[in-house]
Image (cartoon, helix red, strand yellow):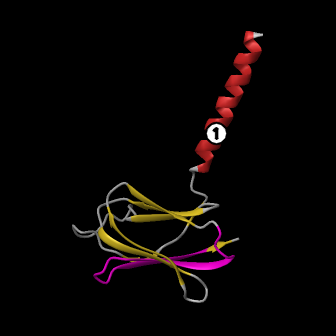
Amino acid sequence: MKCVVFIACLACFSSFFSTKASAHLPAAPIPLKGEIPPPQGPKSPSTSLIEAYQNATSVDLVFNCDLGVLTIEVVDQTGETVYLKKLNAVANGTLSIDTCGWASGEYILMITDGQGGYLEGSFLTD
């Protein structure tokens, strides 16, 4: 009996952890075009300053270095701003944009640094 309970508990825990881990894995990278120069000169060619991923219910940004104040904006197909946020981007920082309830269609993600630097990418929602 103890063996059956132990196996059942083990199955529950492994199911919980595999579900939690897969919920945080990036589903699809969003390619970003443009350039935001790093504060201390040219970046290493092998390092992206900002990475963007689309998951089932969010768009997630990862900041790989300190970039200062950035404006994050998402516009829909009609040019209407559906998300706007200013933040201080720090190394290893993240931002998750909740896309639940957004209409199906194409959206443009725009990231600007206020000094002429920008990154832009598009993604679709269902």
Q: Nearer the viewer, residue 65 or 75?
A: 75
Position of 37 with respect to 82 (left or right) is: left
**Residue 119 counted in the magenta span:** yes
Q: Position of residue 64 (x, y in %)?
A: 36, 59
Q: Please report the residue visible at 27 percent of the width from the left and 70 percent of the height from the top.
A: 42
Tell me which secondary structure the magenta stretch mostly adopts. Answer: strand
| Residue 39 sits in quarter | bottom left
Q: Position of residue 25 (x, y in %)?
A: 57, 51
**Residue 4 counted in the magenta span:** no
Position of 72 with respect to 116 (left or right) is: right
Q: Quadrant of the N terminus?
A: top right
SS class of the residue under badge 1? helix
Residue at the far bottom in the pictured view: 78
**Placement of 24 over or under 126, stated as above or below:** above
Q: Nearer the viewer, residue 89 or 116?
A: 89
Q: Nearer the viewer, residue 124 or 78?
A: 78
Question: Label 1 amino acid?
Answer: Ser
| Residue 71 sits in quarter | bottom left
Q: Position of residue 89 (x, y in %)?
A: 33, 64
Q: Please report the residue visible at 69 percent of the width from the left and 30 percent of the height from the top.
A: 12
Residue at the far left in the pictured view: 40
Residue at mark 1: 18
**Placement of 48 over or under 114, stated as above or below:** above
Residue at the far front in the pictured view: 101
Q: Please report the residue visible at 36 percent of the width from the left and 65 percent of the height from the top.
A: 45
| Residue 72 sits in quarter | bottom left
**Placement of 2 over or under 15, stated as above or below:** above
Q: Position of residue 95 (x, y in %)?
A: 45, 61
Look at the image and give the residue range highlighted in magenta.
101-123
Q: Quadrant of the C terminus?
A: bottom right
Mark 1, Cα crowd under 10 Å, few <14 / some 14-19 / many 20+, is few
